[in-house]
Amino acid sequence: MNMNCSRREFLKRACHGAAVAPFVLQAKRAGAVSPNQRITMACIGVGNQGGHDTRMFLADPRVQIVASCDVDLARAKAMANTIQDRYAKQSGFSGYKGCEVTQDFRELIGRKDIDTVMIATPDHTHSVIAIAAARHGQDIYCEKPLAYSVAEGRAICETVKRYGRVLQTGTQRRSVQMFRHGCELVRNGRIGKLHTVRCVPGRGFGVRGTFTGQEAPEPVPADFNYDLWLGPAPWMPYTTARCHFNFRWILDYGEGYISDNGVHAVDLATWGMGVDLTGPEHIDGKATFPTNGIYDAPTDFEINYRYANGMKLVLASGQGFGVQFEGSEGWLHMGGWDITASSEKILSSTIRPDENRVRTGSLHHADFIDCVLSRRQPTTYPELGQRAASVCHLGYISCRLGRPLKWDPAREIFPDDASANRLLSRAMRTGWNI
């Protein structure tokens, strides 16, 4: 192997080599990477969760962030200043050329000086960005849910596989040791035979700001690219109440708490159940939909899923966040960032080396960079992201149709149900496609 090749060429060779031989490049440890070996990254969507993700990658000395992209120009500029200030104070970045600022992600896709992209845009734009990046040879950190629909998520999985890219989905609880241990306890029978898991992702609308959803259209701010923000979604008049964090409560862009916090809860639930690479066979959902205003996602809902092995999953609205595993000999509850159980004996139990173990590794963002270097599958690789998001999407479809559904998890279709199958994808606005 020519050790004098460029960083990008080296990563490509590692990827191609993995396809024909069991070659694994061990990731360099933090602090041991020279400037010309750093993984370059463009951060797309840098407000709220995207701001957190950007700061996590900014703290990794193996990464060099070279572009800050947001349809809100003020946000993009502010994050670029944060990035540049950090590198100015950090040794080893004396040759840093600065952080580019742009509103348009298309200016960054496929650039040969950008190895990876971080995507933290609204749900409805994940697929168009992720698929374009994968086709152009860039690795991807994509926030949850993986995609807006089942069909778009499947397209991401297929494209990432076809082009040999690394993609990490942002369900970060998978990288927290506490939750890993909790899933191991459940999978190894510490609460007896598991029969039901109850997930609570939230209730109503967690609106940020004083918005009511009744706001009238208003002029688009000069530094906000609203057309790009809408992307593939239908055109609607602009109002501040529609954008940034509060897109979550509007069905053109998401499914409310069903797929917002819901995907975090479902990911943990199906992990502990051991069904995170398949799906349910029966779904029965009921929900309350608002009848006026722009916030039209379900406010109250209860969705019952049944899996082939007989286990039951319930995703129901309620205050706070929680995942409760119920077995024949006790229960285990995962809260926002804590775990409780029906007895201390359950929590203090040690998992033996010969028992069912789940993957261990770095924290979520560091794990992504580890895998960019090694070409291993990350903690939440695309298929896991697709399956967790699909459970949420299927629940929403049942709620929307107001009836139970049968699901074929292998083919990802509703057998002999054309009206339900039509809701697995969505039409995209003219000029947008995947």
Image (cartoon, rainbow, N blue to C red):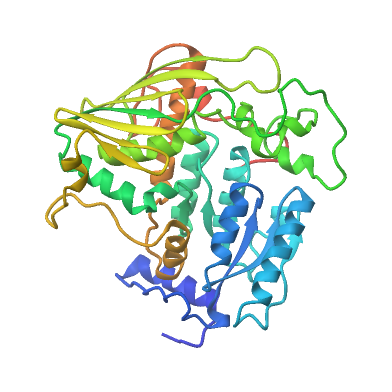
On screen, 330 above or below 188? Answer: above
Q: Is residue 198 visible?
A: yes
Residue 2, by quadrant, is bottom left
Compare residues 395 and 269 and report the one nearer the observer: 269
**Who's the residue at 64% across and 41% down the image?**
433
Q: Quadrant of residue 370?
A: bottom left
Eyeballing the image, is 382 above or below 418?
below
Query: Whole-percent x and y of residue 298?
Result: 55, 20
Residue 69 picture location, percent across and down? 70, 56
Above or below: residue 114 compared with residue 316: below
Give the number of callouts: 0
**Which residue corresponds to the image point at 58% horizontal and 31% vertical from the top-left?**
254
291 sits left or right of 346 in the view: right
Q: Where is residue 379 in the image (x, y as percent from the top left)?
A: 38, 54
Closer to the camera, 271 or 277?
271
**Which quadrant of the rendered structure holds the N terminus?**
bottom left
385 horizontally vs 59: left or right? left
Give left or right: position of 107 versus 302: right
Give the residue drawn at x 41%, y 51%. 381
**What x and y, as percent, mark residue 311?**
24, 27
The correct choice, above or below, for 374 with respect to 248 in the image is: below
